[in-house]
């Protein structure tokens, strides 16, 4: 009894001994993957391909098809980061005031006391407004 496989294929390898999969076969596998409903990891295991190799093929295919949106570059702001000195001192007798308040001392001697987290956004807006030239 002599049986001949319907399809015989010689697998080529690179200098490191890795099997080179022809582009047509890669596309065929990726098409099968899309129809399979399996995860990429499970599909790679089933067909006998290392997951990292399969993931690279899938990523290249998505890039070629334009499946990735254009990278958004964050808008440049003209605001420069400025570091300010913060000094933590022992709370003095608050005299009925909140001893856990944050006190901002501005140039010119003005003091802003923040006693609630809701006031932080307002204080930040105030500082931004004061920083702008008149």
Image (tube, helix red, strand yellow):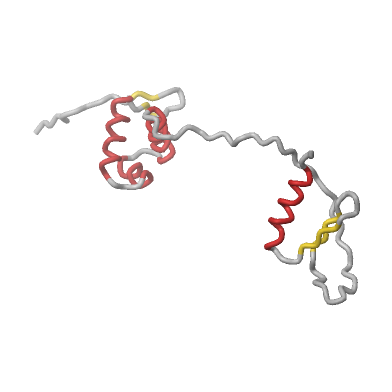
The answer to which of 34 and 86 lies nearer the viewer is 86
The answer to which of 32 and 44 lies nearer the viewer is 32
Q: Position of residue 96 (x, y in %)?
A: 83, 76
Q: Measuring 87% from the left and 57% from the top, which residue is drawn there?
A: 87
Residue 103 appears left or right of 3:
right
Q: Measuring 36% from the left and 29% from the top, which residue is drawn there?
A: 65
Q: Residue furthest bottom?
A: 96
Q: Position of residue 133 (x, y in %)?
A: 79, 39
Quadrant of the snapshot with the N terminus: top left
Q: Which of the 4 quarters of the picture holds residue 28?
A: top left
Q: Measuring 28% from the left and 24% from the top, which residue is drawn there?
A: 10
The answer to which of 110 and 47 lies nearer the viewer is 110
Q: Is residue 92 above or below residue 123?
A: below
Q: Which of the 4 quarters of the picture holds residue 93?
A: bottom right
Q: Position of residue 78 (x, y in %)?
A: 70, 35
Quadrant of the snapshot with the C terminus: top right
Q: Which of the 4 quarters of the picture holds residue 110?
A: bottom right
Q: Residue furthest front?
A: 134
Q: Position of residue 132 (x, y in %)?
A: 76, 41
Residue 102 appears left or right of 76:
right
| Total marks placed | 0
Q: Measuring 83% from the left and 57% from the top, which residue is drawn there?
A: 104
Q: Is residue 129 above or below residue 27?
A: below
The answer to which of 5 and 48 lies nearer the viewer is 48
Q: Residue furthest left?
A: 1
Residue 82 appears left or right of 44:
right
């Amino acid at each position: 009894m002599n049986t001949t496989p319907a399809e015989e294929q010689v697998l080529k390898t690179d200098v490191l001994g890795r099997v080179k999969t022809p582009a047509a076969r890669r596309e065929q596998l990726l098409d099968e993957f899309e129809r399979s409903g399996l995860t990429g990891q499970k599909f790679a295991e089933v067909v006998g391909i290392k997951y990292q190799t399969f993931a690279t093929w899938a990523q290249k295919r998505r890039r070629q098809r334009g499946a990735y949106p254009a990278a958004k570059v964050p808008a440049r702001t003209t605001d420069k980061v400025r570091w300010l000195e913060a000094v933590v001192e022992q709370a003095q007798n608050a005299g009925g005031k909140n001893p856990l308040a944050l006190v901002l001392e501005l140039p010119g001697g003005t003091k802003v006391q923040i006693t609630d987290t809701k006031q932080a956004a307002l204080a930040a807006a105030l500082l931004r407004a004061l920083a702008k030239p008149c």
